[in-house]
Image (tube, grey):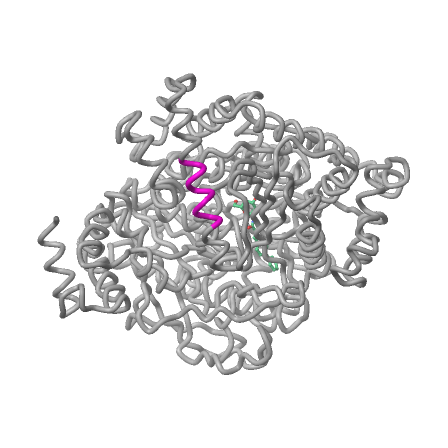
Amino acid sequence: MNKELYRKLTGLCEKPLAQASNRDIYLALLDLVQDLSQKNEKPVTGRKLYYISAEFLIGKLLSNNLINLGIYDDVRAILQDSGKNLSDIEELEPEPSLGNGGLGRLAACFLDSLATLNLPGDGIGLRYHCGLFRQSFQNDVQNEAPDLWLDEHSWAEKTDVVYPVLLAGKTCSARLYKLNVTGYHGRTNHLNLFDLDTIDESLITDGISFDKSDIEKNLTLFLYPDDSDDAGRLLRIYQQYLMVSAGAQLILSECEARGCDLHNLADYAAIQINDTHPSMVIPELIRLLGEKGIPFEETVQIVTDTCAYTNHTILSEALEKWPRHFLDQVVPQLMPVIEKLDCLARTRTDDESTAIIDCRNVVHMANMDIHFTHSTNGVAALHTQILKDSELANFYRLYPEKFNNKTNGITFRRWLLECNPALTKEIGMLIGPGFRQDADELEKLLAFADDPQVLQKLTDIKKENKKALADWLYQKQGIKINPDAMFAIQSKRLHEYKRQQLNLLFLIHLYLEIKAGHTPAVPLVSIFGAKAAPAYTIAKDIIHALIALSKVVAADPQASPWMQIVFVENYNVTAAEKMIPACDLSEQISLASKEASGTGNMKFMLNGAVTLGTMDGANVEIAERVGNDNIYIFGQSSRQVINRYAKGDYCAYDWYESDPNIRRAIDFLCSPQMQKAGHEENLSRLHNELIYKDWFQTLPDFNAYLVRKAQAMTDYAQDTAAWSKKALVNIAKAGFFSSDRTIAEYNRDIWHLGE
Ligand code: 26Q
C-alpha cells in the first residue's frame, strides 16, 4: 500500500477512512487532487493556446484526475482496505454537463490532450449554473428539468479576478473561476470559466423556463437556453459577449504580464475559435487593441495572426447569423468595428456571398471568422473537402492557403483507460504499456488477430461489460436486458440528419418480420441514448415513437425473446462511459455529407464495437483504416446526396408508394397497436413527416440499411471468433483517432505552442 497517500488522505478526512462517510472521502479526494494538480503547473514560455468555446462537456472529473495523476490504483486499494468503494464515492460527484454534444465533448478531450502533451493551452468558457437539461420520460415523452450541477465544493475554484464587461451599455463584472486540467503524466493547464455574481437561480420557474428579462440575473443560468424566441436569441448573444470580452481581457493581461507589448500578441497567444459561438472575440480584440492606441489596420493584422477558426457543421441553419439590430442592442460598441471589417472584406472581393453584413442587414459570424483569422479547418477529411467544394467554395477560392483539415479525436484516458479497465488490462498484457502514451502502438494487437485465446478473451470482456450495463440499466430504469443478445447502440443528440428514425423503421420492420414467422439470426437489444432540443418537435416525436414501439415489443411474447428496445434516460458522459464498452454494433447512420465528423464512432471502435454506418464524417476514415471486412457500410454516397439536393427532385412519397417494405413500416406508426401504446398526435405527425418531407432522405437508404444490418447480425451469430477478430482490428486501428494526434496536428500546422 502507498503509505504516504494513505496518510495524506486520512489527514484530509481528519479521521480514519473506515469511519469517514463517502462524502468526507469525496471532499478529501477533491482536496488531494487539487493539491497534486497544482504541483504540475508549469511556467509558460512562447506561444500559449486559448481554446474559446461556449461548451466544455467535461463529465465527472474524479476518476479522470486520479488516472492522469497516476494514483487511481493506489487510491482504490487504500479505500478497499478501509471497506470503501471508489465507484460509490464517484456517484456523489455531480456531472458538469456544460455542453450539448460533440463540439463540447471535443473541447474537453482537447484540454486533456494539451495537458498530456505538455503544451501550454487553457480553455475559456462560461460557468453555466445549469448544464444541459436533465431528461426524463413522462407519459412516454421527453420532459426537461434544470440540471443545477454546482456544488459548494466544486472543481472550479472562485478567484478574485473580475473583468468589466459592457452589456447593452451597462457594465457588469465577469468573475473568473478556474478549474485545473491535469494531463496524463503531464502538466496542469486551466479551464477558465466566467460568471456573474448576480445570477439568481430562483428565476427558474416551471421546468426549464425562466424570466428572460433581467440579464444580470439570468445570463449564465442555462447552457443554450431555448433560442426559438427573440428573448432567447438575444440571451445567446449576451452570453457569447460575456465569454469573449472577459476572455479577451484575460488573454491580454496574461500576455502583458509575460512581457508582450501587444504589437507582438501573436508571439504570445494563439486563439482557437470553436465554431462561431466565440466569433465576437475578433471585433472585441480589435476594439481593445484600438483602445491601447494601435491603428486599426495593425489591430486587424494582429488579430488575424493570433486567431484561427474551426467549423463543425455544414447544416446551414446552424451557422450563426444575427440580425444587425440584435447586435446594435447588445454590443453597440462592437458595431463600428464589425462595419469596418465588412468594408475591409469588401475591398478584397466583390462576391456578396462572403459579406459580413449582407444586404438584408444580417451579420454572418462564420464569414467574419474566415476573413479575419489565418486558418479555417474542418473536422474530418470528407467534411473539409465538402467545405472547399461547396459550402465555403467562394471562400476557398479567395483564401486557399487558410483551409486545412484536422480530423477529430478522443482522449483514450477517459474513453479506454477509465471506462474499460478490463480491456485496458488485457491490451497491456498483450502489447505492454506503451499504448498508454502512444496510441499508435495499439497496432501491435494485429499480431493476435488469429489467436483463438485472445479472441475468446475479448469476447469474455465484452460479455462482462454487457452484464455491467444490464445491471446499471436495471438499477436505473428497472429494465432487464439479455446480455446474450447482440447489443446495437445509437447514442448521440437526437437530430433528423443523424437518422434515429431510420433505426426506428428498421426495428418496426424487424418486429413485423418476427410476427410473420421470420426470426432474426440473433436476438437484438437496440439501445438508444439521446436528448432532443426542447423546441424540436419532430425529434421529440421520434423519441416517443421509439418508446411506444418498445412497449409494443415488450408486451408481445412472440417478439420479445428476439428483440428489445431500450431508451436510456438522460444520456450524458457518465451514461456513455457505461454504454460504449458494452456495444457490439455501433450505429453511425447519418445521411452522408451531414455529420461533420462524429466522435462517438471513434469511442465505440476503440472499445471493440463494429461500425454499421454510412460513408459520412469520420466513418470514411474509420473504413479506410479497418478495411471492408471489419465495418458494415451502406447507403448513398455524399456525392449522390448532394446531387439529389441540388436537383431538388427527392420525393419521399414516391418511395413510400412504390416500396411495400417502406410503406408497411411507416404505416405501422398509425397502427392500432402503436396508437394504443403511444399518442396519436405525435405518431401521426411523424408519419406525415416521413411521407411528405423526409428532409434527410431516410427512405432511399432504408433497404440498404436492412440488408447490411441483417448481414452484421448473421455474422455475429455464426462465428463468434470471426466477430471478435473484427473487434480486435477495430481496436488495433483506433490509434489514429486519439486526440493526442489531433492536437499534435493543430500544434504543428496552426498553433506552434511554446515557440
Ligand atoms: C447555433 C445557433 C443557435 C443556437 C445553437 C447553435 C448551435 C449549438 C450547438 C450550433 C451548433 C452546436 C453544436 C454543434 C456540434 O456539436 N457539432 C458537432 O461537432 C462535433 C465535433 O467536431 C462533430 O464530431 C459532429 O459531427 C458535429 O455535429
Rendered location of residue 444, percent (x, y): 35, 22
Quadrant in which residue 129 is drawn? bottom left
Residue 629 vs residue 620, the one in the foreground? 629
Task: Count the numbered circles shown.
Answer: 0
Lateral position of residue 392 relative to residue 220, left or right = right
31 over 422 or under it: above or below: below
Q: Residue at 58% of width from left, 30% of height from top?
A: 620
Residue 279 vs residue 70, the one in the foreground? 70
205 over 615 or under it: above or below: below
Q: Residue at 69% of width from left, 32% of height from top?
A: 638
520 over 336 or under it: above or below: above
Q: Residue at 51% of width from left, 42% of height from top?
A: 483
Extent of the magenta region = 461-470
Residue 553 is a magenta residue? no
Residue sitting at the far front: 557
Q: Residue at 43% of width from left, 48% of height from top?
A: 577
Residue 202 vs residue 228, the one in the foreground? 202
Rendered location of residue 625, percent (x, y): 50, 24
Lateral position of residue 493 relative to residue 654, left or right = left
Rendered location of residue 256, percent (x, y): 28, 58
Residue 92 visible here: yes
Q: Main secondary structure of the magenta part?
A: helix
Residue 463 is a magenta residue? yes
